[in-house]
Amino acid sequence: PQYAARCKILINHAHLDMTPLLQWELKCLPLAVGWFERATICTTLSIHNSNPDLSRRILEESKEVFQNRILTALYEFVRGVPKKVLERRDELALVAVYDDKIAMVEEEKKRIQEDVESRKRKITQLEEENKRLRGIVETVRNALD
């Protein structure tokens, strides 16, 4: 029941026209992708009759054909608003550069933290060695007195 509307749309419309959604530019693209993702279940659902031989799939198409539907819809968006896609591509490239820089800074921070921890462990070891040596010096002084 919860998939009925999506499945019925897919059964009755081999091609979903995305051009009415282009008025909102790329804002509807994630919604369309999400709709298709939630409609994927329609490719696996079956109608079961009392006779198992009469059972059939609700949407008689392979996953590859369904993927082609999705790609066609996405292509319509890209083709419909090419300037916006190019602007977003530049924005995404800029975001990718900053993501790389952030990743490098985080990696450097991690390396520095590991170095600090290593130095703290070394200082602790040296302090323990210093205590041990002080104890030996104190023992020797007491023995000489």
Image (cartoon, rainbow, N blue to C red):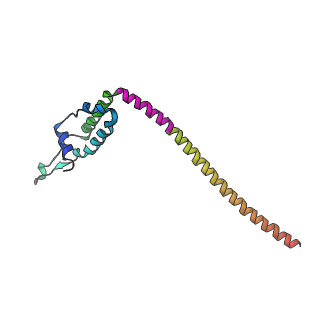
Which image quadrant is residue 145 in?
Answer: bottom right
Q: Position of residue 15 (x, y in %)?
A: 21, 33
The answer to if 90 sits in the magenta stretch is: yes
Residue drawn at x 60%, y 50% as measured from the top left: 113
Residue 62, x across and y down, in percent = 23, 40
Identify the magenta region.
82-98
Inspect the magenta stretch and tell me whether residue 75 lies in it: no
Seen at 21% across and 50% down, the residue is: 2
In front here: 91 or 122?
Answer: 91
Residue 135: percent from left, percent from top: 78, 68
The relative height of residue 2 versus residue 25 in the rendered view (above or below) is: below
| Residue 119 seen by the camera | yes
Residue nearest the viewer, comparing 79 with 41 = 79
Q: Quadrant of residue 10?
A: top left
Q: Quadrant of residue 136?
A: bottom right
- Where does residue 41 sit, x and y in percent of width and height? 24, 46
Q: Residue at x 56, y 42 (%)?
A: 105
* Residue 60 in view, yes or no: no
